[in-house]
Amino acid sequence: MANQAEWNKSSWKNFTALQQPNWPNDEEVKKVLDNLATLPPLVFAGEIRSLKELLAKAVTGDAFLLQGGDCSENFSQVTAPKIRETLKVLLQMAIVLTYAGGKPVIKVGRIAGQFAKPRSADTETIDGKTYPSYRGDMVNQAEFTEEARVPNPKFMLKGYNMAASTLNLLRAFTRGGYAALHRVQAWNQEFVVQSPMGRSYNRLAKQIDHAIRFMNTIGIPTDIPQVNQTQLFTSHEALLLGYEEALTRNDSTTGDWYDCSAHMLWIGERTRQVDGAHVEFLKGVHNPIGVKIGPTYDLEEIKRLIDALNPENEPGRLTLITRLGLKNVEKVLPPLLREAKREGYNIVWSCDPMHANTYTTESGTKTRNFNDIFAEITCFFEAHWSEGTTPGGVHLEMTGENVTECTGGARNIIDEELANNYLTTCDPRLNAEQSLEVAFQIAEMIRS
């Protein structure tokens, strides 16, 4: 870890911080951050350590990381039904991967904090009017008006409160019986039930139900946490460094620093400069860290990045999330895997098949094709098998809702059908049925 004598939670301010909002009033920002620094942590150091121990198993292929959720959470979507539907689909996917794939699954949601997003430009121009870019609900509002686009630091406080209420509900669901294996059939959404994926899922659910009843019959107790509860961890891109610093706390048990805004944080492709503020900040906190890697990566820079973020080569500390695109993955992934293997790096390798497979339809709708998404996952697995390395997880943008945002899948959504229920304010997401289809197909690859 970072030398504690040199690193402190504010040392990132001595480095270039990209993708930060142009706040109009520094005094207001300071007031909000000072307030956030006094509020309770959203997650706890012990939970973060538990996640790191589980991720260490994904390094060696003894567990599989399922990370998924919204591209960018919206305050208006922080409702009990929406949170429940997202949890449902994550639970469904995890049970498919565990039961059909035969491997423990680490469930990490892109949830309870994914309220900020990077942009390719600071401003946006429409019909001759230029306003600041929308940087997520934690910064400004999506409506294209001068007033809505002014960054407002009070939204960071609202983001904290929204994350706290989301976490409160998730904890109730995962520990209060909703996530119990006895209820596995109840997780199937109505619109999925009659689909081929829904029927496959129901067959699997019945098998699990029979197994539990068999255990009861022969006297093996099933009233245990492993059956009645589940673990779900949270993650988001650590983008707004002031917010992340305000929620970074010193753990009284170990004396280590933890960013208590989420269990796992990741650095995006646009902010992973080795000498940048985001790397400086995250190298000193003891959370598991993810790093997004696109197709134009520089191998030597990635090695410097790995050494900076995980100098002790601790298993479970670092997840590299490759977002390469179907056209690039076969060419650019093997050299990276080969070099990391040669260096002996302990890494969780995760595939983000979403970001580099986006295209725009003739009508101007941003979408992704299910076949491209799954083909990239397949190439990811095959590259690992041929290099003798471990495919450790997937990172998906998905929702439990019946959206039409990605084309293809079992129902074969076509471009013209995207407008039927296109709800995202950010990137196109897999719906529950498409997500389940991905899980069944990944399970086959894990098993082999």
Image: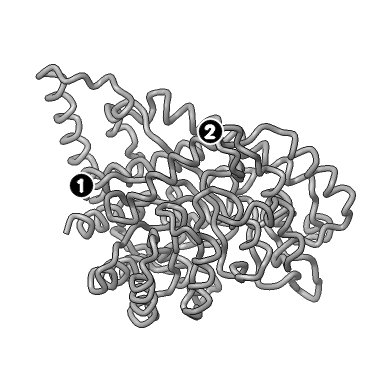
Q: Are marks 2 and 1 in contact (CB under 8 Å)?
A: no
Quarter holding residue 179: top left
Left or right of 235: which side holds 217? left
Callout 2, which amino acid?
Ala
- Looking at the image, residue 368 lies above or below residue 110: below
**Is any part of residue 282 visible from this angle?**
no
Front of the two marks 2 and 1:
1
* Disc 1 residue type (three-letter): Gly
> Where residue 41 appears, x then y in whole percent?
63, 35
- Check disc 2 and report the residue beneath it: 80
Residue 146 position (above or below residue 120) = above
Coloring basis for residues: one colour
Q: Is residue 229 left or right of residue 21?
A: left
Crowd band around label 1 with a 10 angstrom C-alpha radius: few (<14), some (14–19), many (20+): some
CA neighbours of label 2 inside 10 A, class few (<14), some (14 to 19), many (20+): few
Residue drawn at 59 percent across, 68 percent down: 272
Q: How many marks?
A: 2
> For mark 1, what is the residue?
102
Residue 341 visible in the shown view: yes
Mark 2 / mark 1, whichever is N-terminal: 2
Q: Quadrant location of the C terminus?
A: bottom left
Residue under the point 60% across and 36% down:
251
Locate residue 226, reporting x and y percent. Answer: 30, 29
Q: Secondary structure at mark 1?
A: loop
Q: Residue extending furthest front?
A: 5
Q: Split into 4 quadrants, where in the image is the N terminus? A: bottom right
Q: Position of residue 356 (x, y in %)?
A: 46, 72
